[in-house]
Image: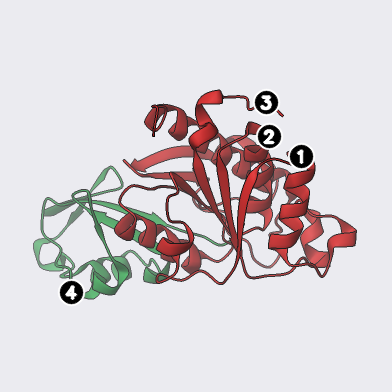
Chain colours: A green, B red
Amino acid sequence: MATLRINGTDREFPEEALPATLLDLLNTLQIDQATVVAEINGAIIERKYFAQTPIQEGQSLELVRFVGGG
Amino acid sequence: MTPVFFELKNAVVGIAGLGGLGSNVAVALTRLGPGRLILADFDGVEESNLNRQQFFRDQVGMHKVDATLVNLHRIQPELDIVGHKVRLDPDNIPRVFEGCDVVAECFDRSDQKQMLVETVLTRMPETFIVSVSGLAGYGRSNDIVTRRISKRHILVGDGESATGPGVPLTAARVGIAAHHQANAIIEILMNEFNQPRF
Protein backbone atom coordinates (compact mmCIF):
# COMPACT_ATOMS: atom_id res chain seq x y z
CA MET A 1 0.00 0.00 0.00
CA ALA A 2 1.06 3.61 -0.59
CA THR A 3 0.24 6.19 2.05
CA LEU A 4 -0.57 9.86 1.61
CA ARG A 5 -1.23 12.15 4.53
CA ILE A 6 -4.22 14.29 3.52
CA ASN A 7 -5.39 17.07 5.84
CA GLY A 8 -3.72 15.38 8.75
CA THR A 9 -5.15 11.91 8.17
CA ASP A 10 -3.27 8.99 6.60
CA ARG A 11 -4.94 7.56 3.53
CA GLU A 12 -3.81 4.35 1.90
CA PHE A 13 -3.95 3.48 -1.77
CA PRO A 14 -3.04 0.19 -3.44
CA GLU A 15 0.36 0.80 -5.07
CA GLU A 16 -1.08 0.54 -8.56
CA ALA A 17 -3.96 2.88 -7.71
CA LEU A 18 -1.92 5.79 -6.34
CA PRO A 19 -3.03 8.78 -8.44
CA ALA A 20 -0.26 9.98 -10.75
CA THR A 21 -0.88 13.70 -10.42
CA LEU A 22 -2.54 16.12 -8.02
CA LEU A 23 -5.38 16.54 -10.49
CA ASP A 24 -5.87 12.76 -10.62
CA LEU A 25 -5.97 12.67 -6.83
CA LEU A 26 -8.62 15.42 -6.67
CA ASN A 27 -10.68 13.53 -9.26
CA THR A 28 -10.32 10.33 -7.23
CA LEU A 29 -11.51 12.20 -4.14
CA GLN A 30 -14.33 13.78 -6.21
CA ILE A 31 -13.21 17.30 -5.36
CA ASP A 32 -13.76 20.08 -7.91
CA GLN A 33 -10.25 21.34 -8.64
CA ALA A 34 -11.55 24.89 -9.21
CA THR A 35 -12.36 25.16 -5.50
CA VAL A 36 -9.12 23.85 -3.97
CA VAL A 37 -6.05 25.53 -2.57
CA ALA A 38 -3.40 22.82 -2.35
CA GLU A 39 -0.15 22.43 -0.49
CA ILE A 40 2.24 19.51 -0.80
CA ASN A 41 4.79 19.18 2.00
CA GLY A 42 4.07 22.78 2.95
CA ALA A 43 4.53 24.31 -0.50
CA ILE A 44 1.61 25.91 -2.33
CA ILE A 45 0.82 24.32 -5.69
CA GLU A 46 -0.91 26.73 -8.06
CA ARG A 47 -4.06 25.40 -9.65
CA LYS A 48 -2.66 25.74 -13.18
CA TYR A 49 0.00 23.18 -12.22
CA PHE A 50 -2.32 20.57 -10.66
CA ALA A 51 -2.28 18.40 -13.80
CA GLN A 52 1.52 18.30 -13.98
CA THR A 53 2.30 17.92 -10.28
CA PRO A 54 3.27 14.30 -9.53
CA ILE A 55 1.94 12.55 -6.44
CA GLN A 56 4.41 10.39 -4.53
CA GLU A 57 4.05 8.03 -1.63
CA GLY A 58 4.64 9.61 1.76
CA GLN A 59 3.69 13.14 0.78
CA SER A 60 1.74 15.31 3.17
CA LEU A 61 -1.03 17.26 1.47
CA GLU A 62 -3.25 20.04 2.68
CA LEU A 63 -6.31 20.36 0.44
CA VAL A 64 -8.44 23.34 1.41
CA ARG A 65 -11.79 23.06 -0.33
CA PHE A 66 -13.93 26.18 -0.61
CA VAL A 67 -17.72 26.02 -0.72
CA GLY A 68 -19.92 28.92 -1.83
CA GLY A 69 -21.45 31.53 0.44
CA GLY A 70 -20.37 34.85 1.85
CA MET B 1 -12.63 57.76 18.46
CA THR B 2 -9.94 55.99 20.45
CA PRO B 3 -8.66 52.75 18.94
CA VAL B 4 -9.11 49.75 21.19
CA PHE B 5 -5.53 48.70 20.56
CA PHE B 6 -3.14 51.58 20.08
CA GLU B 7 -0.64 49.05 18.73
CA LEU B 8 -2.79 48.53 15.66
CA LYS B 9 -2.71 52.09 14.44
CA ASN B 10 -0.15 51.10 11.81
CA ALA B 11 -2.06 48.05 10.62
CA VAL B 12 -3.30 47.89 7.03
CA VAL B 13 -6.11 45.44 6.32
CA GLY B 14 -7.65 44.58 2.95
CA ILE B 15 -11.24 43.41 2.52
CA ALA B 16 -11.92 41.56 -0.72
CA GLY B 17 -15.68 41.64 -1.33
CA LEU B 18 -18.29 43.68 0.51
CA GLY B 19 -21.10 41.18 0.91
CA GLY B 20 -22.29 39.38 4.00
CA LEU B 21 -18.75 38.70 5.17
CA GLY B 22 -16.96 41.83 4.02
CA SER B 23 -19.51 44.38 5.17
CA ASN B 24 -19.50 42.84 8.64
CA VAL B 25 -15.72 42.45 8.85
CA ALA B 26 -15.40 46.11 7.82
CA VAL B 27 -17.67 47.31 10.63
CA ALA B 28 -15.91 45.19 13.27
CA LEU B 29 -12.47 46.39 12.18
CA THR B 30 -13.57 50.02 11.92
CA ARG B 31 -14.61 49.98 15.57
CA LEU B 32 -11.15 48.67 16.37
CA GLY B 33 -9.45 51.59 14.65
CA PRO B 34 -6.75 50.17 12.34
CA GLY B 35 -4.36 52.42 10.44
CA ARG B 36 -5.99 51.84 7.08
CA LEU B 37 -8.68 49.72 5.47
CA ILE B 38 -8.52 48.88 1.76
CA LEU B 39 -11.88 47.81 0.33
CA ALA B 40 -12.61 46.20 -3.03
CA ASP B 41 -15.86 45.23 -4.72
CA PHE B 42 -17.40 45.63 -8.18
CA ASP B 43 -21.06 45.40 -7.28
CA GLY B 44 -23.97 47.55 -6.20
CA VAL B 45 -26.24 47.19 -3.17
CA GLU B 46 -29.33 45.13 -4.00
CA GLU B 47 -32.59 44.58 -2.15
CA SER B 48 -31.66 40.89 -1.70
CA ASN B 49 -28.49 41.85 0.19
CA LEU B 50 -30.34 43.43 3.09
CA ASN B 51 -31.09 40.11 4.83
CA ARG B 52 -27.46 39.81 5.90
CA GLN B 53 -25.28 42.64 4.71
CA GLN B 54 -24.49 45.88 6.55
CA PHE B 55 -26.32 48.22 4.20
CA PHE B 56 -29.54 50.18 4.52
CA ARG B 57 -32.68 50.19 2.39
CA ASP B 58 -32.02 53.72 1.14
CA GLN B 59 -28.61 52.52 -0.15
CA VAL B 60 -30.08 50.08 -2.68
CA GLY B 61 -28.56 51.02 -6.05
CA MET B 62 -25.42 52.59 -4.57
CA HIS B 63 -22.06 51.06 -5.33
CA LYS B 64 -21.06 48.88 -2.37
CA VAL B 65 -17.73 50.65 -2.05
CA ASP B 66 -19.47 54.04 -1.77
CA ALA B 67 -22.09 52.76 0.65
CA THR B 68 -19.47 51.09 2.84
CA LEU B 69 -17.35 54.24 2.93
CA VAL B 70 -20.36 56.26 4.09
CA ASN B 71 -21.28 53.72 6.76
CA LEU B 72 -17.76 53.27 8.12
CA HIS B 73 -17.16 57.01 8.26
CA ARG B 74 -20.36 57.41 10.27
CA ILE B 75 -18.74 55.08 12.85
CA GLN B 76 -15.26 56.59 12.67
CA PRO B 77 -15.00 59.78 10.59
CA GLU B 78 -11.19 59.93 10.70
CA LEU B 79 -10.57 56.35 9.57
CA ASP B 80 -8.26 56.08 6.56
CA ILE B 81 -10.22 54.04 4.00
CA VAL B 82 -9.26 53.36 0.40
CA GLY B 83 -11.98 51.99 -1.89
CA HIS B 84 -11.42 50.16 -5.17
CA LYS B 85 -14.36 49.66 -7.53
CA VAL B 86 -12.88 46.72 -9.34
CA ARG B 87 -13.43 43.05 -10.10
CA LEU B 88 -10.45 41.37 -8.47
CA ASP B 89 -8.28 39.00 -10.50
CA PRO B 90 -4.80 37.47 -10.12
CA ASP B 91 -3.24 40.42 -11.93
CA ASN B 92 -4.73 43.29 -9.94
CA ILE B 93 -4.91 41.71 -6.46
CA PRO B 94 -1.24 42.38 -5.54
CA ARG B 95 -1.64 45.99 -6.68
CA VAL B 96 -5.01 46.68 -5.01
CA PHE B 97 -3.89 45.20 -1.69
CA GLU B 98 -0.28 46.38 -1.82
CA GLY B 99 1.04 47.02 1.69
CA CYS B 100 -1.69 45.03 3.46
CA ASP B 101 -0.65 43.08 6.55
CA VAL B 102 -3.75 40.90 6.21
CA VAL B 103 -6.41 40.42 3.52
CA ALA B 104 -9.87 39.13 4.41
CA GLU B 105 -11.33 36.81 1.75
CA CYS B 106 -15.00 37.81 1.71
CA PHE B 107 -16.20 36.42 -1.62
CA ASP B 108 -19.33 34.40 -2.27
CA ARG B 109 -18.27 32.01 -5.04
CA SER B 110 -16.03 29.06 -4.26
CA ASP B 111 -13.82 29.45 -7.34
CA GLN B 112 -13.28 33.13 -6.55
CA LYS B 113 -12.29 32.25 -2.99
CA GLN B 114 -9.76 29.78 -4.38
CA MET B 115 -8.39 32.39 -6.81
CA LEU B 116 -7.89 35.05 -4.14
CA VAL B 117 -6.31 32.77 -1.54
CA GLU B 118 -3.95 31.22 -4.06
CA THR B 119 -2.95 34.65 -5.40
CA VAL B 120 -2.18 36.11 -1.97
CA LEU B 121 -0.23 33.03 -0.87
CA THR B 122 1.84 32.86 -4.05
CA ARG B 123 2.30 36.52 -5.00
CA MET B 124 2.16 38.48 -1.74
CA PRO B 125 4.79 36.85 0.48
CA GLU B 126 4.42 39.37 3.33
CA THR B 127 0.63 39.23 3.55
CA PHE B 128 -1.63 36.98 5.60
CA ILE B 129 -4.99 35.77 4.28
CA VAL B 130 -8.06 34.93 6.37
CA SER B 131 -10.58 33.00 4.27
CA VAL B 132 -14.00 31.40 4.82
CA SER B 133 -15.50 28.10 3.69
CA GLY B 134 -18.86 26.85 4.97
CA LEU B 135 -21.29 29.27 6.59
CA ALA B 136 -24.69 28.74 4.93
CA GLY B 137 -27.88 27.94 6.82
CA TYR B 138 -28.69 28.59 10.44
CA GLY B 139 -27.96 27.06 13.84
CA ARG B 140 -24.85 24.91 14.39
CA SER B 141 -23.02 27.99 15.66
CA ASN B 142 -20.24 25.97 17.20
CA ASP B 143 -19.47 24.11 13.97
CA ILE B 144 -17.90 27.32 12.67
CA VAL B 145 -14.27 27.26 13.69
CA THR B 146 -11.04 29.13 12.99
CA ARG B 147 -8.09 26.98 11.90
CA ARG B 148 -4.55 27.83 10.92
CA ILE B 149 -3.80 26.02 7.67
CA SER B 150 -0.27 27.38 7.28
CA LYS B 151 1.84 30.28 8.49
CA ARG B 152 -0.05 32.88 6.43
CA HIS B 153 -3.41 31.17 5.85
CA ILE B 154 -6.17 31.10 8.45
CA LEU B 155 -9.46 29.42 7.50
CA VAL B 156 -12.87 30.05 9.08
CA GLY B 157 -16.06 28.03 8.65
CA ASP B 158 -17.56 24.57 9.04
CA GLY B 159 -15.92 23.46 5.79
CA GLU B 160 -19.04 22.07 4.18
CA SER B 161 -22.20 24.22 4.40
CA ALA B 162 -22.51 25.61 0.87
CA THR B 163 -25.25 27.97 -0.15
CA GLY B 164 -27.74 26.65 -2.69
CA PRO B 165 -31.39 25.81 -3.24
CA GLY B 166 -33.06 25.53 0.17
CA VAL B 167 -29.89 26.57 2.01
CA PRO B 168 -30.13 30.30 2.67
CA LEU B 169 -27.48 32.66 3.92
CA THR B 170 -28.57 34.22 7.20
CA ALA B 171 -27.30 37.36 8.90
CA ALA B 172 -26.73 35.43 12.11
CA ARG B 173 -24.57 32.60 10.77
CA VAL B 174 -22.74 34.73 8.19
CA GLY B 175 -22.14 37.19 11.02
CA ILE B 176 -20.59 34.49 13.18
CA ALA B 177 -18.16 33.64 10.38
CA ALA B 178 -17.43 37.31 9.68
CA HIS B 179 -16.61 37.95 13.31
CA HIS B 180 -14.40 34.85 13.45
CA GLN B 181 -12.60 36.46 10.54
CA ALA B 182 -12.31 39.88 12.17
CA ASN B 183 -11.16 38.27 15.42
CA ALA B 184 -8.53 36.20 13.59
CA ILE B 185 -7.28 39.36 11.90
CA ILE B 186 -6.89 41.13 15.24
CA GLU B 187 -5.01 38.11 16.59
CA ILE B 188 -2.64 38.09 13.60
CA LEU B 189 -2.00 41.80 13.92
CA MET B 190 -1.32 41.54 17.65
CA ASN B 191 0.91 38.48 17.39
CA GLU B 192 2.74 39.05 14.12
CA PHE B 193 2.87 42.81 13.56
CA ASN B 194 2.79 44.27 17.03
CA GLN B 195 6.20 45.85 16.65
CA PRO B 196 7.12 49.48 16.08
CA ARG B 197 7.43 50.13 12.36
CA PHE B 198 8.93 53.28 10.85
**Residue hosting label 2:** B31
Location of residue B161 (image quadrant) = bottom right
Label 1 Cα neighbours within 10 Å, binned few <14 / some 14-19 / many ≥20 = few
**Residue hosting label 4:** A52
Tags 4 and 2 on a common chain: no
- Up-down: is B140 above or below B81? above
> Circle 4 sits in a helix, a strand or a loop, which is it?
helix
Instruction: Tell us which disc is closer to us: 3 or 2.
Output: 3
Residue B2: numbered disc: 3
- Disc 2 chain ID: B
Q: CA distance from mark 4 to mark 1?
A: 50 Å
Residue B135: numbered disc: none
Q: Are marks 4 and 2 in contact (CB under 8 Å)?
A: no
**Residue hosting label 1:** B75
Residue sitting nearer the eye, B198 or B148: B198
Q: Quadrant of the N terminus of chain B?
A: top right
Q: Quadrant of the C terminus of chain B?
A: top left
Which kind of residue does numbered mark 1 sit on? Ile
Which kind of residue does numbered mark 3 sit on? Thr
Label 3 Cα neighbours within 10 Å, binned few <14 / some 14-19 / many ≥20 = few
Tags 4 and 3 on a common chain: no
